[in-house]
Image: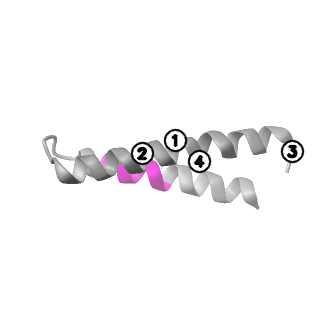
């Protein structure tokens, strides 16, 4: 794994942490329809990218 991939993984980890916090908040306060689904979709996309980078 090169330095660029490691840096991207760190960025993904930070984004995932932030998105998971947003997801928890969105589940508690469901103002906008579709917000929870959109956050979950973004989390899944980032997790897939992280998995691909680790391989």
Q: Residue 2: which numbered mark, if any?
A: 3
Lower sequence index among marks 3 and 1: 3
Lower sequence index among marks 3 and 4: 3
Task: State the SS at label 4.
Answer: helix
Lower sequence index among marks 4 and 2: 4
- Identify the residue at image location x=50%, y=48%: 16
User: Residue 46 location, x and y as percent?
Assistant: 54, 49
- Identify the residue at image location x=16%, y=45%: 33
Task: State the SS at label 3.
Answer: loop
Q: Residues within 10 Å of mark 3 (few under 14, many from 20)?
A: few
- Identify the residue at image location x=68%, y=57%: 52
Q: Is residue 22 above or below residue 37?
A: above
Instruction: Determine which quarter of the picture holds residue 7.
Output: top right
Q: Are marks 4 and 1 in contact (CB under 8 Å)?
A: yes
Distance, label 3 to label 4, CA atoms, is: 17 Å
Distance, label 3 to label 1, CA atoms, is: 20 Å
Q: Residue 15: which numbered mark, if any?
A: 1
Q: Residue 4: which numbered mark, if any?
A: none
Q: Disc 4 marks which residue?
A: 13
Residue segment shown in magenta: 37-44
Distance, label 4 to label 2, CA atoms, is: 10 Å
Q: Disc 2 marks which residue?
A: 19
């Amino acid at each position: 794994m090169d330095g660029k991939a490691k840096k991207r993984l760190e960025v993904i980890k930070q984004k995932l942490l932030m998105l998971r916090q947003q997801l928890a908040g969105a589940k508690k306060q469901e103002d906008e329809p579709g917000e929870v689904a959109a956050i979950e979709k973004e989390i899944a996309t980032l997790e897939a990218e992280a998995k691909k980078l680790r391989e």
